[in-house]
Amino acid sequence: MILFFPTTNFATFDKNFDMNIPEELKYTKDHEWIRVEGDQVVIGVTDFAQKELGDIVYVDVDTEGETLDFEEVFGSVEAVKTVSDLFMPISGEVTEFNEELEDAPEAVNNDPYGAGWMIKVAFSDASEIEGLLSAAEYKDLVGA
């Protein structure tokens, strides 16, 4: 999803860095979260990612209605200092974009796992979900 710190050694981050990593979600090494809701998933960026990006000023998703493969770009997020592509963590059809983000992109910063969700996807291969990181694995990745 976001390739803005590929050489960062996450183990060096301050252990007191207050990160919210809900146990019930799945995660990617690219700092996306995935919540399964029946035959769809809801996708957004993690608390860690939004803190690294800084103040988010624009979320661009123009792939609603399209079927995309794993790791294809589904949109981008613009922060004050950077623009990052957003990549599909699983294959499927983008069924919905969180239109609230058009007028309030700061919701990604304020509530990344709630009001800041980005897209909903009707997944085509449930086995891809199995390959995602658990909360414990994601915590290890970011050194939490």
Image (cartoon, rainbow, N blue to C red):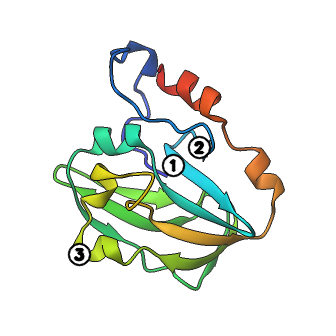
Real-space CA distance between mark 1 and mark 2, rounded to the nearest whole angstrom: 5 Å
The correct choice, above or below, for 144 with respect to 51 in the image is: above
What amino acid does circle 1 point to?
Answer: Glu
Could you say which disc has been placed on residue 103 in the image?
3
Q: How far apart, in angstroms, are the residues tagged by discs 1 and 3?
A: 22 Å
Q: Which amino acid type corresponds to the residue marked 2 in the rendered image?
A: Thr
Q: What whole-number distance in Å separates the C-alpha atoms at marks 2 and 3?
A: 27 Å
| Residue 25, image x, y percentages | 61, 45
Q: Nearer the viewer, residue 25 or 46?
A: 25
* Relative image position of residue 52 (x, y in whole percent): 30, 38
Q: Position of residue 144 (x, y in %)?
A: 47, 21
Residue 143, x across and y down, in percent: 48, 19
Please state if 32 lies on the left or on the right of 89 as rendered: left
Residue 18 vs 25, above or below: the answer is above
Q: Residue at x 53, y 39 (%)?
A: 22
Q: Give me the residue at 43% from left, 45% from top.
A: 3
* Residue under label 2: 28
Q: Quick one: label 2 or label 3, which is nearer the N terminus?
A: 2
Are dots 1 and 2 in contact, CB under 8 Å?
A: yes
Residue at 52% x, 82% y: name it: 64
Nearer to the camera, 102 or 63: 102
Q: Residues within 10 Å of mark 3 (few under 14, many from 20)?
A: few
Q: Residue at x 29, y 50 (%)?
A: 109
Judging by the rendered image, the residue that carries numbered circle 1 is 32
